[in-house]
Image: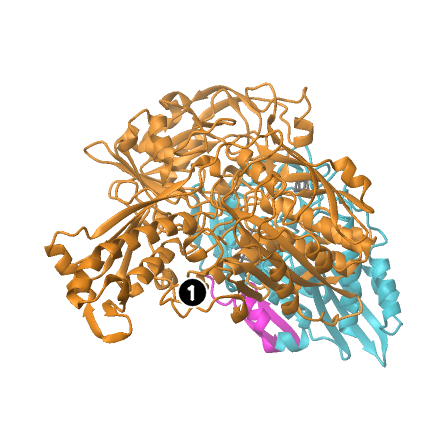
Amino acid sequence: MKKDPKDQLSNYEYQFIGKPVPRHDAWDKVFGRTKYADDFDMPGMLFGKVLRSSYPAAKILSIDTSGAEKMPGVAAVLTAKDVPNNETVTRFGQTHQVGGFEGLYRVLADKKVRFMGEAVALVAAETEEIAEEALARIKVEYEQLPGVFDPLEAMNPDAYQVGEGDSNIICNYQVRKGDVKEGFSRSHVVVENTYRVPFVEHAFLEPESGIAWIDDSEIITIRVSTQVIEHFRDVADVLGIPHNKVRVIAPMVGGGFGSKEDITVETFLALLTWKTGKPVKMTWTREGSIISSSKRHPYVMKYKTGATRDGKLMAMEAQLISDAGAHVYLSPWVLLYSTVDATGPYDIPNVKVDSYTVLTNNTFTSANRGFGAPQVCFAYESQMDELARRLSLSPLEIRKRNYLRKGDALATGRVLEYGVETEKTAIKALEALGEPSMPSSPTEKIGQGLASGMMSYGRMTFLHDTSRSYVGIELDGSVTVRCGVQDIGGGQASSLASIAAEILGVPMEEIKVFIGDTALTPIAGTTTATRMLYMSGNATLKAATEVKKSLLPKAAEMLEASPEDLVFRDKKVFVRGAPARAIPLADVVKACAADGVQLYNVAQFNAPFRELIDFKTGQGQVFPDFTFGSHAVEVAVDTETGKVRVLKLVACYDVGQAINPLSAEGQIEGGALYGLGYALTEEVILDKGITLTPSFSEYLVPTSVDAPHVKTIMLESRDGAGPFGAKGIGEPSCNSIAPAVANAVANAIGARILDLPLTPEKILRSLQKL
Amino acid sequence: MKRFAHLNARTLDEAVLYLRRYGGRAKIIAGGTDVLGRMKDEIVPTYPEALINIKTIPGLDFIEEREGSLKIGALTKLEDIARHPVIKAKFSALAEAARRTASPHIREMGTIAGNICQDIRCWYYRAPNNRFPCLRKGGGRCYAIEGDNRYHSIFGASVDGGCLAVHPSDIAPALIALDAKIRTSERKIKAEHFFEVGVCKTNVLEEDEIVTEIEISQPPVGSKSAFIKFAARETIDFPVVNCAATIVGSEGTVQAARICLNAVYLKPYRVTSAEQAIIGKTISDNSVEDAGIEAVRQAKPLARNTYMVQIARTLVKRAVLACG
Ligand SMILES: Cc1cc2nc3c(=O)[nH]c(=O)nc-3n(C[C@H](O)[C@H](O)[C@H](O)COP(=O)(O)OP(=O)(O)OC[C@H]3O[C@@H](n4cnc5c(N)ncnc54)[C@H](O)[C@@H]3O)c2cc1C
Ligand code: SF4
């Protein structure tokens, strides 16, 4: 990792912020001491299993569970008829209901199955083997239906209807700015291409897992691997019980990447424990996880982009069609991200975007790291390079002439109020990439590629997002933070400790962060949308500042100084400029306690609240802010086999302010590899709704041997909406890598591939070897 | 996973006896890396009633040079083969094939006999819970013909309308290129004749027959062997195509050659036409180009695997070059 001192204010005034400190959870993970969801057992617990559909599209004629029920050791067999409210409607808002789209959440398939892997029945039994055998004894009679597996086909009015409605099209958005006809007529080159991207698996280490129990006051507690503990409400609605009777606890999560944003095992567990009165555990197999949980949306993207002779973009027209799979889930919102991000970080005077998301009988798609941004980034960044090639401009030059800057407006009219350092990230990434390497053989070709990306952090502003955090100081000066975050491995909890440590001058080791418990920690919202640092970081900053404020008068009195002159550091309070005048923080706290001063604060942070945008013009504000950055990549292409090797990879992103640079770097490296798989090997392949890649033998995630060294360059503009000027980096870090690879490959072989992943087959075809 | 019996055999005879007793309803387990995966996923309709463990039979795990030959016991781990100094020096195609097989964990468990007896990987065939009851399982059709056949045979099926799966082993082509012999509880078979395909079958072994040893004669003076693999990732993946070659040369000209591709057909595919193309020639960019072209002259690729033809052609070239 390299920090450029010219590009940041130096960190001298901070003690903890911006300092690379090992995360508080690191050693426990390294030594295997962290108790993940499946590591937790309870005496007398049952094992839950799911019977999944045998067909991607079928009518359920009958279900006979008697054979399973009769088995010794089987405690419950449930089908749709046993679920109090089998169908609920998710409005995506959690706390703020917004109109527009509603996602049906159907717990167990009823009458009709929509995809292979849809849950049809649940079993709880004394052992996993009995549960497995019980599944085999449930007799489901199906009548197969034709189904539809291609989103373009599914859009036809007379196509097979996936759901119960009268159209497979879930929704459509439009962005209208200026006049694209006019824009194209004033363009000297117009590039038109259709891009395709595949289904992608999240491939977290820890599959969906949890355990639930019910206590004597009839509270159902679910300890589950999730990104959203707030699903306790949905679970309660399914059971038809008050919301405060369901408690969700999220232990450390072994990776989420968006797939644990939707409900996974929690409703199943709640139902089974509610029926049997016993603790129930459920962990999905890898195959179960791949065939039944959400995937990243495949898109078909038609792009037409025009520029003047000197490379100024004049118009862009895009049609985006995404495959939502069998259920709505978060597809409308993912599509909205794509729609807003469709122009990329460029200033284009005339824009027209039409986007659709469509039901099919494929595995359903929903949130996946990037939430609709990486798909369009692949398309708009490929277009930029194609324009550059046609205009004989360098990839950097054409981008420089079009990058949005602070104060500019997106095609949706939204003015960028915070830092926009895209150009700087591109220049630095290319600089670090250096001169192209020499080919290692006459049949090898070397290519370099650049891509820039723009992706929001923070949830959509019409969802009226909020977060809360509790900060309290104990009598010995140690600090307790309580915040309902889900830590999915990105250091979400640790960053709150850094913030509290900074404000209160208490070392990191003496900060304890309690997370992820709907009964005991203030609700902090979802660990999704790269919002956690932004939202809960700000809430924690606010709470810690309040605590400090309440200690100040007493400390001033004790030190006989004015409050403005006091410094909190090393668990002491000092008088600025007179370090000898210091008293232990604990003494101040004790004195405050004796006076009845409140030693804690619960603060709420509200994101900007806006109303729903106009879906016909796209005008309005959708996001609080964006993170900008670039990837530069060098590849070697074997022209006789089509194999691509990534030789160099540079990631340069403006993180605003790295709270803990080690964590931020971890996100940037992880994001780069996540995107590298997207570029080269990852693809969930379905044959008429049946997954042909149900394990990591077929679904090809880059291995450690495939991973190139990732060179991370972090810019710190200190101009973000998060605490200390931070921006979000979790999702944006994977945004522009696939197009950078595609651009490098195009540079190497002199031909452009429009579909991901860039397999040997496609490369050999482009080289006209086939 | 369903219930099954697990029987530890103490001698080869006992193992054979168990196999006979179960009459086709038992399977041998060595490292278990293939057979257990198959059973866990319940990919075939008939589930074995018993696994006969041969790891408990002493004396099947060895690498030695004896009577002018290299002998490798059936239970020898792939990792031991990959690291063996003699194999690396004299039988490099085999050492390299072992080194490029699977991942370190699997090489530490998987045995050489298990590797050549492993089942095919066609994704329709391997789909858990017998989702595609295809020809090879005794069903009515091959799903790969019209389905996604990007990893299937480029040389057609052995019978019209037959199975289009490929043999997935990295070890097999190396053994054929080195002209190895496979000793079983019954007989000695040339590696080339060991592979055969039928319903749920990849080799010529009888139901009660067990591989005991692999034997490779000392390479003739002036011979060199090489193995080249193409896979999607740098480790753990099965080959998309691989190629092993042995070239015997004298004063710069090729005297004899054995070249074998795998993962391109139901069984390892020896390309005698490519061998012919370089015999009597010196190894040069031109002669290997011809060998590559000859190797795939008979190719009949499917809708999605034309690229494999190009790769096969390239690997043949490169394997021969590596022997030069
Ligand atoms: C993730 C993964 C990746 C892999 N990648 C590769 C790869 O890149 N290249 C490659 O070549 N292979 C690969 N393999 C296959 C692997 O090499 C084989 O599974 C392994 O070599 C089999 O050996 P085993 O001892 O574990 O066999 P087992 O699983 O015990 O047995 C396999 C089969 O052989 C039979 N068998 C075993 N021993 C004998 C014997 N002595 N006589 C008769 N029959 C016998 C068994 O009955 C069974 O049918 C991979 C496997 C996995 C799981
Ligand atoms: S290729 Fe063979 S194994 Fe695969 S589906 Fe066809 S018949 Fe079955």
**Local crowd size for mark 1, using a 10 Å CA cut-off: few (<14), some (14–19), many (≥20):** many
Secondary structure beneath dot 1 equals loop
Q: Is residue A605 left or right of residue B83?
A: left
Residue placed at 66% from the left, 51% from the top?
B204
Residue A676 x, y percent position in the rendering: 61, 56
Residue farthest bottom in this picture: B251
- Count of marks placed on residues: 1
The colour one sees for chain A in the rendered image is orange
Residue B212 x, y percent position in the rendering: 57, 62
Vertical order, A611 against B296 (above or below): above
Question: Do we see residue B190 in this rendering?
Answer: no
Q: Is residue B67 magenta?
A: yes
Q: Quadrant of the N terminus of chain B?
A: top left
Which chain did the image draw in cyan? B
Residues drawn in magenta: B56-85
> Does the Cβ of the disc 1 residue fall within 8 Å of ligand 1?
no
Res A115 quadrant in image = top right
Three-letter code, disc 1 = Gly
Res B126 quadrant in image = top right
Name the quadrant where ligand 2 sits.
top right
The residue that mark 1 highlights is A18
Residue A707 x, y percent position in the rendering: 58, 62
Q: Nearer the viewer, residue A353 or A225?
A: A353
